Image: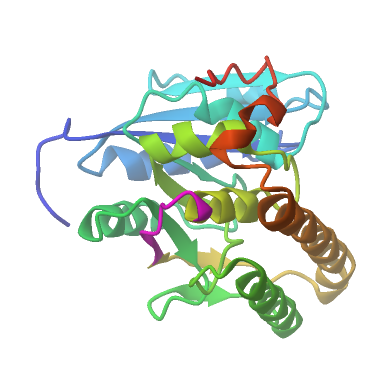
Amino acid sequence: MITQPKGSHLVSLVIPAFKQEKTILKDLNRIEKVLKQLRYDYEIIVVVDGMLDNTYKNAKKTHSDHITVLGYEKNRGKGYAIRYGMVRAKGTIIGFMDSGMDINPNSLSMLLEHFEWYNADIIIGSKRHPASKVDYPFNRKVLSLVSQIFIRILFGLNVSDTQTGIKFFQKKVVQDVAPRLLVKKFAFDIEMLAVAYSLGYKRIFEAPVELNLNLKDSIVSQNLLSAVLKSLWDSLAIFYRLKILHYYGDNNKKRWKHDTDLNFKIN
């Protein structure tokens, strides 16, 4: 690891959380334990996506000054939760990471180091990076590969994995891209990457992750297939807005849907 005094960057990490009352506090402790060991100043912004259980209450039990817990009553989807946190982030590097135990928090170190090595606009965690350590069922690999080929054909993104839930962005990318976005749920990652790429943020690179998705086949087959199909449908809608309507372009600012709860300033 590169040795350097803290303070060169402030890293803002947004954690969307939904119905995770049993694990959220443990997840936050694991994530912060890793961030404390890195050479970056940091803040963690937890966004509870709907007050449907005790996730918010349990997250508030953290005693760390580096953790801010936010939330709202109605479930809006992961994409909305991430944007809600991003607009409140103070960092020069802003990212998000799925809560839960699937992604090993040690992956944060690799992404941030790769971010600086490549002078990236965006760095994304990739299951298919040669150095990744990934455990997940064969049928999930097949669905993921088919989905990724489809995404590459639609948007020309030269990356092997858009859907692993850990990514970092330059602050300027977030400020430029986030006000234009519409997807609140399944294809948020794809929309953010595709729009950023179309706006000229071409320095998108991949970094290795440690990931354990070795779930029961019945759960994977039922829930994952549904999520993949919905994500692909959303992807077609993104393609239509991007390539046909040119919805995301600067000339179309008046048509962007500005949500006052997100408080993005559109100049």
Q: Is residue 134 above or below residue 108?
A: below
Check the image and report above or below for 233 versus 179: below
Which residue is most to the left? 4
Task: Identify which residue is drawn at 61% across, 52% down.
Answer: 189
Examine the structure image and report whether residue 14 is included in the region drawn in magenta. Answer: no
Q: Nearer the viewer, residue 60 or 108?
A: 108
Tell me what residue is drawn at x 68 percent, y 34 percent.
80
Q: Does 242 sit left or right of 109 as displayed?
A: right
Write down the quadrant of residue 72 in the picture: top right
Q: In this rendering, would 13 be left or right of 116?
A: right
Q: Tell me, what colour scheme is on the image? A: rainbow
Residue closest to the eye, 184 or 164: 184
Give the number of callouts: 0
Residue 239: image location, x then y, percent: 71, 58
Q: Is residue 100 above or below residue 139?
A: above
Q: Specify whether residue 28 is in view.
A: no
Horizontal and vertical percent position of residue 124: 45, 58
Image: magenta residue range: 198-206
